[in-house]
């Protein structure tokens, strides 16, 4: 039980770091931004696995509420953009086991590949839900007379790729500098992810 509590506390701290980084101004216009909070979520998900990564992402989304950092159009929109989307940021954890195996094999190329795929999957999974919300709920605000689907795809796609690229660069850099950051030494490592 103590190990699970430690992972939950670590995930909560990571979510707090993610919301703090998210508050740094990186937006260009009203629809494009680079989410720096994706960086710690990606690192944590790759370190701890899918379920802890999803938990940290969900907490990151929930923290937006007491801070008043939400844009409210409707309850379904808020649920999609702040609970589902941020939860899905933890999907980087799908590549935690391949990363751990690559580290155990001392295969740096394979490890970096796992980090790149994890960072990309986490960002794309999260922004898929932002795309859905942009299309369904924010479509009437599409600029330049664009179709809501195209506008949401372009703006959220660009944000996803930029956020994923920044998360990947930061995570690969940290992996090269401090590889032990990605290998938990406690008894509740990746294998007890369930």
Image: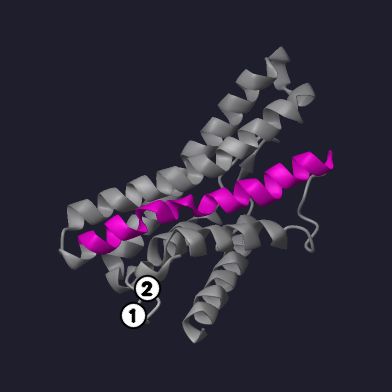
CB of mark 2 within 8 Å of CB of mark 1?
Answer: yes
Question: In this figure, which residue is indicated by the disc labeled 2?
Answer: 189
Up-down relation of residue 128 to residue 64 (above or below): above
Residue depicted at x 67% and y 56% = 61
Q: Which quadrant: the C terminus?
A: bottom left
Which of 19/80 is in front? 80
Q: Secondary structure at mark 2?
A: loop
Q: State which mark lies toward you, 2 or 1.
A: 2
Residue depicted at x 61% and y 51% = 86
Q: Which residues are magenta?
A: 73-102
The residue sitting at the front extreme is 194
The image quarter in which residue 20 lies: bottom right
Q: Residue 173: x percent and y percent?
A: 33, 59
Question: In screen coordinates, is 92 left or right of 78?
Answer: left
Which of 39/94 is in front? 94
Is residue 163 visible to the viewer in this orientation of the structure?
A: no
Question: In screen coordinates, is 50 left or right of 108?
Answer: right
Up-down relation of residue 186 to residue 108 (above or below): below
| Other residues around mark 1 within 10 Å, as few (<14) / some (14–19) / many (≥20) | few
Up-down relation of residue 112 to residue 188 (above or below): above
Q: Return the mark for residue 185.
A: 1
Q: CA distance from mark 2 to mark 1?
A: 7 Å
Is residue 88 visible to the viewer in this orientation of the structure?
A: yes
Residue 87, magenta (yes or no): yes
Residue 30, magenta (yes or no): no
| Other residues around mark 2 within 10 Å, as few (<14) / some (14–19) / many (≥20) | some
Up-down relation of residue 118 to residue 51 (above or below): above
Q: Secondary structure at mark 1?
A: loop
Q: Residue 77: x percent and y percent?
A: 76, 39
Q: Residue 145: x percent and y percent?
A: 72, 13
């Amino acid at each position: 039980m103590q190990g699970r509590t430690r992972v939950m506390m670590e995930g909560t701290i990571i979510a707090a770091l993610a919301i703090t980084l998210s508050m740094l101004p990186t937006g260009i216009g009203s629809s494009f931004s680079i989410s720096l909070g994706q960086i710690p979520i990606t690192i944590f998900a790759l370190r701890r696995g899918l379920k802890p990564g999803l938990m940290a992402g969900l907490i990151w989304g929930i923290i937006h509420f007491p801070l008043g950092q939400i844009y409210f159009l409707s309850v379904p929109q808020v649920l999609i953009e702040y609970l589902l989307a941020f939860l899905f940021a933890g999907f980087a954890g799908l590549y935690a086991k391949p990363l751990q195996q690559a580290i155990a094999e001392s295969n740096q190329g394979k490890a970096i590949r796992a980090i790149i795929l994890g960072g990309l999957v986490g960002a794309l999974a999260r922004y898929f839900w932002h795309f859905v919300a942009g299309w369904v709920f924010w479509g009437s605000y599409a600029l330049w007379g664009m179709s809501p689907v195209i506008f949401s795809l372009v703006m959220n796609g660009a944000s996803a790729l930029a956020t994923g690229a920044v998360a990947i660069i930061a995570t690969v850099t940290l992996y090269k500098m401090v590889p032990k950051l990605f290998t938990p030494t406690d008894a509740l490592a990746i294998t007890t992810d369930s």
